[in-house]
Amino acid sequence: MQILKSSLRPLIGWLTVAAFVLFGSGWMSGIGHASGLAMFVWLFLVIVYVAFGVVHEAETLADMLGEPLGTLVLTLSIVVIEVVLISAVMLGSHDNATLARDTMYSVLMIVLNGVVGLGLLMGGIRHYEQTYNLKGATAYLSVIIPLTIIALVLPDFTKSTHDGSLSPPQAIMFSLLTIGLYGVFLWLQTGRHQGYFVAPDAQPIDPKEMAHHRPVAIDKKTLLVHFGLLLVNILPIVILSKSLAKILDYGIAQTGAPAALGGIVIATLVFAPEGISALIAIRADRLTRAINLCLGAVTSTLGLTVPAVLAISLYTGRPVLLGLEPTGIVMLVSTLLLSSITFSNSRTTMLEGAVHLSLFVVFLVLVFSP
């Protein structure tokens, strides 16, 4: 019954794929304002719905496999969706050099200001004060801050290029550095410092016992079924991303909307399941889990999406501009500084949430009125 219930999401996804394979070319050739909006809403809702299935199956596999394979499966599943959506839009249009930058910047703003702000405000109203594992949040920020500066700020100040891009040697070295730093963080998170990422009142983990820790016996048939369901959920998103990219590109061009809106749409698609899960966790007074979801999503975006996008750029020759505009740099630095202050104390209140939400509103205003 559980397997049949889990099959509903991919079934809807594959039915949508079949509809676009059979009739998509005709729909695209005669696309108009009303039909384009209808298809966009349809694809957006289907992809978000199927993405919930990806997260569910990845979390199930994470519980079955234990660490570190479980964390890798969950992280890579979300990053695959993000990279596929960015790549589809990049390759489908010749004028999307800033899409990767806009998407990563939007993820940072939506997560660190929007979701964190709403969550802390909601949690403060409901629980007055909430506690979390300070060491884990500090570890996340210690990786997020340098990776953010390297990816989105430094390209504006290098002398090799003058348009916010990276030269090939810089792209290769920064990609290796980013992957290496993220790998070290992942190793510490799933190894000797695993206790940093559990609730403060949870049973402490003895580092000496970590080497002897093994997950419970795994039913191989069940494991293969969930791996199959994971792939069945991811594939329709991969296939539908090309159609969504065309509609999104058409809509932005026809309406004159800011190009950054494409990055916001992709960031929302990618993070919607985890964002909703984080808000549910905060409502249940599980702030540590919510922080792991939010800051973990930002860390994986910077640690894995940046190298993937730069690799696509080097392979295809498509330019990728990573350096932010001056207003974006101001907002980014303000967000990182505010996050460092918010997560410098093991207790949070609704005040921190209100301040983060204020920055998120400023971000939205600047998108449509730079």
Image: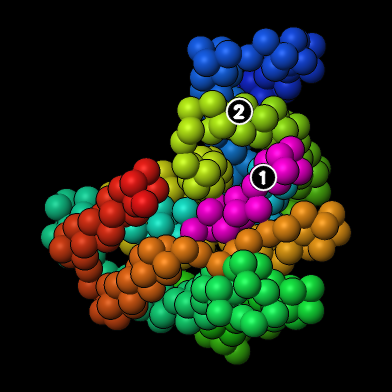
- Under tag 1, what secondary structure? loop
Tell me the magenta residue range.
88-105
At a point 48% along the width and 81% down the height, the residue shown is 142
Based on the picture, tell me whether residue 92 belongs to the magenta stretch: yes
Residue 121 vs residue 301, the one in the foreground: 301
| In-image side of 241 versus 296 (left or right) | right
Residue 353 location (% of width, % of height): 23, 59
Residue 72 location (% of width, % of height): 68, 62
Q: Residues within 10 Å of mark 2 (few under 14, many from 20)?
A: some
Q: Is residue 151 above or below residue 298?
A: below
Q: Is residue 66 above or below residue 138?
A: above
Residue 344 location (% of width, % of height): 29, 80
Residue 202 vs residue 353, the one in the foreground: 353
- Under tag 2, what secondary structure? helix
Q: How many marks?
A: 2
Q: Amino acid at mark 1?
A: Asp
The residue singled out by tag 1 in the image is 95
Asked where in the image residue 318 lies, by quadrant, the reply is bottom right
> From mark 1 to mark 2, how far is it between C-alphas?
12 Å
Residue 232 location (% of width, % of height): 75, 34
The residue singled out by tag 2 in the image is 250
At a point 63% along the width and 41% down the height, the residue shown is 54
Which mark, by number, is residue 225?
Answer: none
Locate the N terminus and report the quarter of the image it occupies.
Answer: top right
Asked where in the image residue 74 lies, by quadrant, the reply is bottom right
Residue 136 vs residue 24, the one in the foreground: 24
Q: Amino acid at mark 2?
A: Tyr
Based on the picture, tell me whether residue 21 belongs to the magenta stretch: no
**Residue 332 visible in the shown view:** no
Q: Is residue 52 above or below residue 82?
A: above
At a point 74% along the width and 38% down the height, the residue shown is 92
